[in-house]
Amino acid sequence: MSLFTSPFDPARETALVTGAGNGIGRAIAQALVGEGVRTVFADLYEDKVLAAIKAAPRPELAVAWAGDLAQRAACDALLAHAQATVGQVTHFVHSASPPRREADHAMAVDEETWGQMHAVNLEAGFHMSRELARKLIAAKTPGSFLLLTSLHAGTPRNLPHYSTAKAGMAMLVKELAKSWGRYGIRVNALVPGAITAGGFVADPALAKHIPLGRLGQADDLAPMALAVLSHKLSGYVTGASIIVDGGLSLTNWFAPPELD
């Protein structure tokens, strides 16, 4: 049997994907149900979640949830909903992130915008990962977590709230991977490049900086995400940051922002 025939065990594995209403999170959640994995689609907007489920290859395996993960109570409500609907979550994908505006450079970003970016990306990612890990450790069940970071975890983006949140997530992946590896819980990062999805509208001219010659699509991320999540395919991979960017990280194309 091919290694790629059945990368997951639907009888024992379930998933929770945040940011599943659009963009990369949506593509990954849809790919998971396509592999037979019962999956919670979580996002801020219910209409987007329902649309993502309707368009999924096996919508009967999807569960919807909507709420603001900047709020700790919402994170706990999501975890409780997942437990009640799909049971023990073994695969966690944290793709949720507030929209980013080019106007929010270092001299312009306000405290609310700064706080929300960190709350959804870093704080919610840590809290939900830890709570899911507690249950997996208690049940002596392996798990696989995937946090969506960014090329700008390591290079400036002129959006300090976004870059610092993603940088924190990149180190969080390493911390959690080191702490939980002994329990069979793998934690990795997927590092997207210029992906025209999830509200990010890239200048087509950016393609000239990409060695593969084009902007990325959300569906470019989903196959790699599934490969890293799968114990069968990536059982010896943890604490890794896998870049999917068409080679964009080989250049640094951003000029400093205008501060007038």
Image (spheres, rainbow, N blue to C red):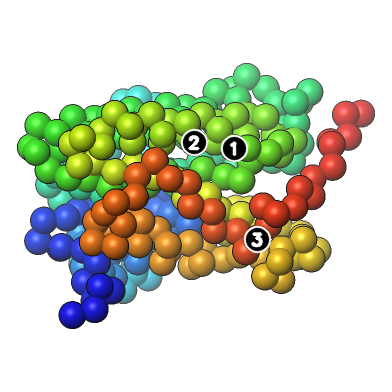
Residue designated by label 1: 153
Total count of labels: 3
Residue designated by label 3: 247
Q: Quadrant of the N terminus?
A: bottom left
Asked whether the residues under the numbered discs 3 and 1 touch, taking CB atoms below 8 Å apart as contact, a structural biologist would say no
**Residue at point 38%, 29% (across, down):** 175
Residue 75 appears in which quarter of the rendering? top left
| Residue type at tag 3 | Gly
Q: Find residue 246 and report its horizontal and vertical position in percent.
A: 62, 64
| Residue type at tag 2 | Ala
Q: Find residue 95 and report its horizontal and vertical position in percent.
A: 44, 46
- Rounded to the nearest whole Å, what is the CA distance between mark 1 and mark 2? 7 Å
Asked whether the residues under the numbered discs 1 and 2 touch, taking CB atoms below 8 Å apart as contact, a structural biologist would say yes
The answer to whether residue 196 of the structure is visible from this angle is no
Which mark is on residue 86?
none
| Residue extending farthest bottom | 1
Above or below — where is 23 with respect to 4? Answer: above
Give the mark, 1 or 2, whose residue is nearer the N terminus: 1
Q: Find residue 59 and report its horizontal and vertical position in percent.
A: 26, 68
Residue designated by label 2: 170
Could you tell whether 213 is left or right of 68 in the image?
A: right
| Residue type at tag 1 | Ala
**Residue at point 15%, 63% (across, down):** 10
